[in-house]
């Protein structure tokens, strides 16, 4: 019997990718991390091969293995979202076909980094990239919407056109980093004839984002604080502002811990947090990322204590 297509909504943690001291994938640690996340009551899915998993540093074969392990661990219980991250459109098509065969239930489509050189002025380039992926799979797609200032974000007209052109686009992961544009995304994507969901990844202002009407969130911070994210989303859905603010007060120290400058260390910091919490044994990252200093790790420990997150 075919499963119902995945509906991208609710709380979707993006998992990390543990490495051993030789910087190979630590499969045992990865399986444990996946199971830790899967045990959180109320999550809707788990994302692999995203920014949080250092997908930029994973080979095609490692990405495939990452999906296969996750599919094996999660089975039919938790839907699996797989990132499609490459500047090469032909490779994106190949990744999409592989992820479908390997057991993904949905694909998170990153924009091609080639588009930083003026792609916002050539919407047909984004259309070509998305078309290649959409024609390679029948899985529901989640478009990753970047900030406009980095020149990878889709202009709103382009985003709406893509959603109209490709009906398998069922959601966006919104990182536009602009509250006004974020609200327009929510209102205008929801108003389409085939409504498209909005998943927030505005982890630095998550409460503010969710109250605008997001359908959920997809965030690397969920690798550490998924229970708090579930509680916050539920409080917002229940219109319980007092409870939402109380939960947000606990989340705030983790924002300070994970999302301080430089942002390139955000998932590095999350790995260190999991070590401090006893959920990972070691926090290795692949170059060009570098391990944090003891001072930075101690700061993360202080922030976790402020958030009342303990072993």
Image (cartoon, rainbow, N blue to C red):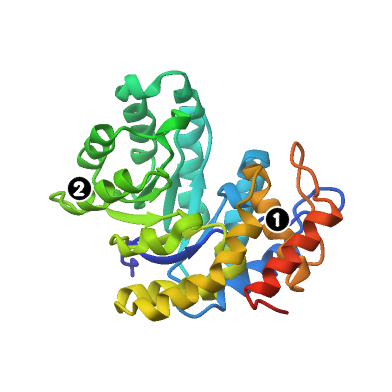
Q: What is the total number of numbered labels drawn onto the structure image? A: 2
Can residue 298 be seen here? The reply is yes
Residue 45 image point, x, y percent: 46, 66
User: Secondary structure beneath disc 1?
Assistant: helix
Label 1 to label 2, Cα distance in Å?
35 Å
Residue 2 image point, x, y percent: 33, 66
User: As drawn, is 66 to the left or to the right of 213?
Assistant: right
Q: Determine whether 245 is above or below 212 in the image.
A: below
Residue drawn at x 28%, y 62% as measured from the top left:
213
User: Secondary structure beneath disc 2?
Assistant: helix
Residue drawn at x 32%, y 60% as measured from the top left:
214
User: As drawn, is 148 to the left or to the right of 275?
Assistant: left
Quadrant location of the N terminus in the rendered image? bottom left
Can residue 76 be seen here? The reply is no
Q: Which residue is mark 1?
A: 269
Quadrant location of the C terminus in the rendered image? bottom right
> Dot 2 surroundings within 10 Å: few (below 14), some, or many (20 or more)?
few
Residue drawn at x 48%, y 35% as measured from the top left:
92
User: As drawn, is 248 to the left or to the right of 236?
Assistant: right
Comparing 23 with 289, the one in front is: 289
Point out the tag, 1 or 2, that comes first from the N-terminus: 2
Q: Determine whether 81 is above or below 79 in the image.
A: above
Q: Determine whether 184 is above or below 15 in the image.
A: above
Q: Point out which mark residue 188 bears.
A: 2
Direction left: furthest residue? 193
Q: Point out which mark residue 169 bears.
A: none
Residue drawn at x 37%, y 58% as measured from the top left:
209
Residue 21 image point, x, y percent: 87, 52
Residue 183 image point, x, y percent: 28, 51
- Figure quadrant of residue 18: bottom right
């Amino acid at each position: 019997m075919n499963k119902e297509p995945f509906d991208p909504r609710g709380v979707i943690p993006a998992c990390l990718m543990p490495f051993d001291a030789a910087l190979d994938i630590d499969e045992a640690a990865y399986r444990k991390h996946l199971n830790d996340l899967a045990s959180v009551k109320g999550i809707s899915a788990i994302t692999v091969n995203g920014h949080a998993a250092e997908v930029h540093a994973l080979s095609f074969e490692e990405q495939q293995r990452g999906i296969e392990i996750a599919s094996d661990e999660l089975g039919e219980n938790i839907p699996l979202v797989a990132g499609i991250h490459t500047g090469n459109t032909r490779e994106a098509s190949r990744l999409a076909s592989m992820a479908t065969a390997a057991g993904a239930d949905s694909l998170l489509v990153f924009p091609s980094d080639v588009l930083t050189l003026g792609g916002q002025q050539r919407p047909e380039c984004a259309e070509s990239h998305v078309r290649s992926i959409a024609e390679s799979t029948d899985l529901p797609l989640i478009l990753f919407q970047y900030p406009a200032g980095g020149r990878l974000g889709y202009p709103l007209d382009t985003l709406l056109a893509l959603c109209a052109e490709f009906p398998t686009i069922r959601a966006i992961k919104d990182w536009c980093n602009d509250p006004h544009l974020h609200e327009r995304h929510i209102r205008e994507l929801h108003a389409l004839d085939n409504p498209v969901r909005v998943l927030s990844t505005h982890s630095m202002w998550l409460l503010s984002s969710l109250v605008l009407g997001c359908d959920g969130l997809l965030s690397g911070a969920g690798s550490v604080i998924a229970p708090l994210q579930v509680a916050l989303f539920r409080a917002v859905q229940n219109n319980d502002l007092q409870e939402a603010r109380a939960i947000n007060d606990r989340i705030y120290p983790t924002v300070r811990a994970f999302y301080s400058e430089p942002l390139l260390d955000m998932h590095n910091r999350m790995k260190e947090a999991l070590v401090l919490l006893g959920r990972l044994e070691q926090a290795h990252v692949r170059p060009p990322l570098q391990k944090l200093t003891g001072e930075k790790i101690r700061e993360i420990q202080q922030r976790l204590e402020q958030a009342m997150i303990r072993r």
